[in-house]
Image: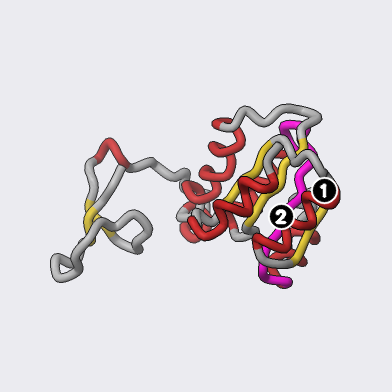
Amino acid sequence: GRSRFADPGIKGSGSHVGYGVCSAEAVYKIPEDVIDEEAALWVMAGVGLHGARMTRIEAGETVALLGLGMIGQIAAQAERQRGAYAIASDRSDKRVRLAEAAASADDFFVGDADAFAAHIRDAYPNGVDVVVDSGGRTAVWDACVRMAR
């Protein structure tokens, strides 16, 4: 559900805010032993899991994933858990190194979307089975299309 900011002086909806006002049906009881800072991230992590379910990624498929923030890291891990071969990329070398350390994907690439698309087409001339953009940037749409089978 959506919420509104607790401060009436701030305009807009408060999806990712420290404090918001929402209906009782839109909140979840967190167990006492869960750290508040960790609990605050569970919905964001769920986005990556939900994406893997929605795209019906299957074992044996090859997935190209753009963006290795928290959502991308979880998405890559969910793809692997479903049996797919996940190739993950990000413009940030630091994010790629963190993903490698966490073994979030099977293969990694550092570079922008166009460079990643060229890399994927070199390795998979017919394209990959699934392309995931975990950042939601419309600027990468053409690169995503070029990677898809």
Indicate the quadrant where residue 110 lies. bottom right
Span highlighted in magenta in the image: 80-93
Residue 80 drawn at (x, y percent)? 75, 39
The tag on residue 117 is 2
Give the quarter of the figure containing the N terminus: top left
Query: Who's the residue at 62% across and 28% down the image?
Result: 56
Label 1 sits on a secondary structure element that is loop
Residue 106 on image: x %, y %: 82, 48
**Which quadrant is the C terminus positioned in?**
top right
Dot 1 crowding, Cα within 10 Å, few <14, some 14–19, many 20+: some
140 is higher (above) or lower (below) than 131? below
Residue at 71% over, 55% down: 117
- Name the residue at the right extreme: 123
The residue singled out by tag 1 in the image is 106
On screen, residue 144 above or below 49: below
141 sits to left or right of 146: left
Q: Does the magenta segment cover residue 143?
A: no
Q: Earlier in the sequence, mark 1 or mark 2?
A: 1
For the view shown, which residue lies furthest in the left direction?
Answer: 8
**Badge 2: few (under 14), some or many (20 or more) residues near its Cα, within 10 Å?**
many
Q: Is residue 91 above or below residue 81?
A: below
Is residue 83 part of the magenta span, yes or no? Answer: yes
